[in-house]
Image: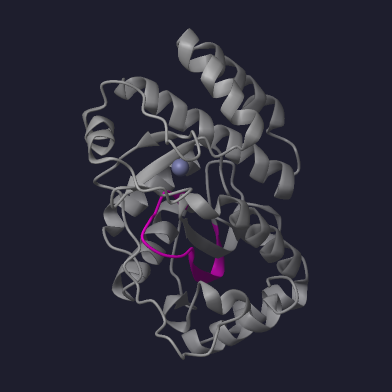
Amino acid sequence: MKSVLNQLSQLQELILARDEHRLTGDGAHLARLNEAIESMTVGLPDNVRSFYSRLITRDHVIMAPVHKGSCAVCGMHLPISQVQSVRQCQAIQYCPGCSRILYEDLNAPQWVGTTPSRGEPRKNGISRFSAETLMVPDMVAGSAADAIEILAGKMEAAGFINNSDALIGSALERESMLSTAMDFGLAFPHIRGVEGGSLTLACGVSKEPFEWDASGTKTSIVFLITIPAAVSAFYMRLISGLTEAFLKEANRNALIDAETPQALWKALVKATRNTIK
Ligand SMILES: [Zn+2]
């Protein structure tokens, strides 16, 4: 059963990667993605495939992590016996609330930040999921792996995420499926299923553009993003807002010119003021 769950979660990643690619990419990898999705769908056991087909027409997030005894997507509290069944992986378990396929990854990194106390002013725009402490204006990286390691370490050191090693592993796994590097020297590595709080974004800037992957794409601005399963749809809006902001050369230069975390944060807030609500 574990292997079927792995197949399903890879399939979901491919489908979400295709959604992201349609939104921000140039369409160059669509044929390859479609082919991989098709062959993986055909490879599912018959009974699972029919259920999967019904789920996928409704929403592209078909898998729901179990977090603290509840479905992390719809929030439904699960019976203890079902949580145990998910843990034992003997049969596929569906959430009684949203019908998604439940899984549990005890080793997954978690959001461990502090929630704002009552009475604190409500944050707007990018301040809702990033902070000055997550800015790296002087990133020295020679590859995607370097950049991801630096930014994941920053997220852990700043007290937002635990288990940065697992975070790095998941981000690199996602990169190996389809590179998140884009035009204009931008890259958006990300990790889904980081539960416990909100979406979190760290930004690293390399003064010297470096080769992100084997294709030789030059990158200088990297956004590492952790995504709780329930806000996958919002994540799409976030990357489209970031892409829109940084199509403008002046906005990219403002990030590259920033010398301190404070200046980088200020430039990021300013550039995204109208594109991220
Ligand atoms: Zn649910």
The C terminus sits in image quarter: bottom right
Point 29% across, 73% down: residue? 157
Residue 127 in sight: yes
| Residue 55 in the image: above or below residue 109 | above
x, y percentage for residue 134? Answer: 44, 75
State the extent of the magenta-drawn residues as a range.
191-210
- The magenta stretch spans residue 138: no
Point 41% across, 49% down: residue? 72
Q: Is residue 37 left or right of residue 111?
A: right
User: Farthest residue toward the top?
Assistant: 46
x, y percentage for residue 8? Answer: 46, 27
Q: Is residue 42 left or right of residue 75?
A: right
x, y percentage for residue 269? Answer: 62, 81
- Residue 183, by quadrant, is bottom right
Residue 40 in sight: no
| Residue 276 in the image: above or below residue 67 | below
Decide whether the magenta segment is chiefly helix, strand or loop: strand
Point 44% across, 63% down: residue? 141
Point 43% across, 86% down: residue? 118
- Scheme of colours in the image: one colour
Q: Is residue 258 left or right of residue 229?
A: right
Q: Nearer the viewer, residue 41 or 25?
A: 41
| Number of numbered markers | 0
- Residue 266, by quadrant, is bottom right
- Residue 231, by quadrant, is bottom right
x, y percentage for residue 270? Answer: 68, 84
The image quadrant in which ligand 1 is located: top left
| Residue 94 in the image: above or below residue 111 | above
- The magenta stretch spans residue 204: yes
| Residue 48 in the image: above or below residue 219 | above
